[in-house]
Image (cartoon, rainbow, N blue to C red):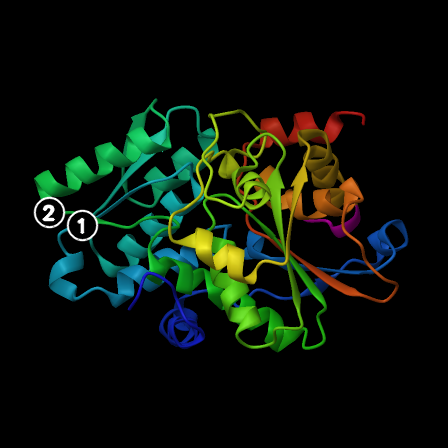
Amino acid sequence: MSEYPTIKDIQEAKKRISPYIHHTPILRCEKMESRFGCEIYFKPETLQVTGAFKLRGALNKALSLPEDVRKRGLIATSSGNHAQGLAYAAKMLGVPAIIVIPADAPKLKIENTRALGAEVVLYAGNTAERWKLVYKMAEENGYVPVHAFEDPMVMAGQGTIGIEILEDLKDVDTVIVPMGGGGLISGISTAIKETNPNVRVIGAEPAMTPKYYTSRLKGKYTALPDAYTVADGLRLSVPGKNPYPIIEKYVDEIITVSDDNIKEAMRMIARDAKLIAEPASAICIGVLLEGKLKVREGEKVCSVLSGGNWDLEELAEIYSEKK
């Protein structure tokens, strides 16, 4: 397999992981439609086995490894959702999982990862520093690193979401996808564009960490300084090396979203769709709140709700805020 997944890779991933995951539904939210002037649909990966899409990619990678290789143990770094996905996959297959998690990650994500049997290493360094630690530990102990967005098998697993959207909402016009490292949108955009290039794919990126937006603006791969955004799963300030060319090829538009609109989107999703969406997930509705995306009446717009794993206390604080 090359560094970039093809539609064939994604179709094979779907066959591989389907027995173990939820084929999440497409849900329409008519309450939001008068506000935005189009038909609103959700692909709620919040309802996935681990509460987030990351299980798909982690499981596809783990299942693709020879048994003697994966028995050595799987290792990764993650702010929480990839950690839980990989921990679940490892537990299902009866192999060790070692996860390096940011020290300031939501407590719920840390607790859930431990509850799945993974060894958790809390580390205060940035993403690059955490990956250096991962590769050092992998070399010393023989673990298999499973990168959350650079690994093509992980991207292919995430791309199965795109196949499901096209199966369940055949006349979809636009799909909005959160952008962190880029593994999710690179997989989904490949699945969609290599099946139906007429479907528009929109990337949603925090205004505080707009690495892909800035890269496209400058016409070259561009890393940014680390910055804070409420969307903890999208805080990466450096584009993924492998996702970057896929995103440039297949993603029609990248729209940045303020933290205020991310939080307002969380409140709207809870109130109108009765779904819990963490900030990194709610950013898709944040795109519509920004008013930068042109939509027409009757257009079918599907937002990928990537995950719902967040501390209840922090959710309550955001839900009670007034815009």
Q: Is residue 120 above or below residue 54?
A: above
User: Which quarter of the image is occupied by the C terminus?
Assistant: top right
| Total numbered badges shown on the rendered structure | 2
Relative placement, left or right, of 234 versus 289 is left
Residue type at tag 1: Gly
Q: Secondary structure at mark 1?
A: loop
In the rendered view, would you say 106 is above or below 145? Answer: above
Q: Where is residue 313? Give x, y as percent.
A: 60, 27
Position of residue 312 measured from the top left corner of the image (x, y, whole percent): 59, 32
Q: Which residue is mark 1?
A: 73
Q: Is residue 22 visible?
A: no
Residue occupying the point 85% across, 54% down: 31
* Residue 9 magenta-highlighted: no
Q: Residue at x 68, y 38 (%)?
A: 257
Depth check: give the residue in front, 169 or 195. 195
Q: Residue furthest front?
A: 219
Label 1 and label 2: CA atoms lie apart by: 8 Å
Q: Position of residue 291 (x, y in %)?
A: 80, 44
Q: Depth-wise, is mark 1 or mark 2 nearer the camera?
A: 2
Magenta stretch in the rendered image: 272-277
Q: Earlier in the sequence, mark 1 or mark 2?
A: 1
Which quadrant of the figure has residue 25? bottom right
Label 2 environment density (alpha carbons within 10 Å; few <14, some 14–19, many ≥20)? some
Regarding mark 2 in the picture, which secondary structure is present there?
loop
Task: Determine the residue positioned at 38% across, 71% down.
Answer: 13
Residues at discs 1 and 2 in contact (Cβ within 8 Å): yes
Quarter residue 45 falls in? bottom right
Label 2: which residue? 142
Place of residue 174 in the rendered image (x, y in percent of width and height, measured from the top left): 70, 63
Q: What amino acid is at disc 2?
A: Gly
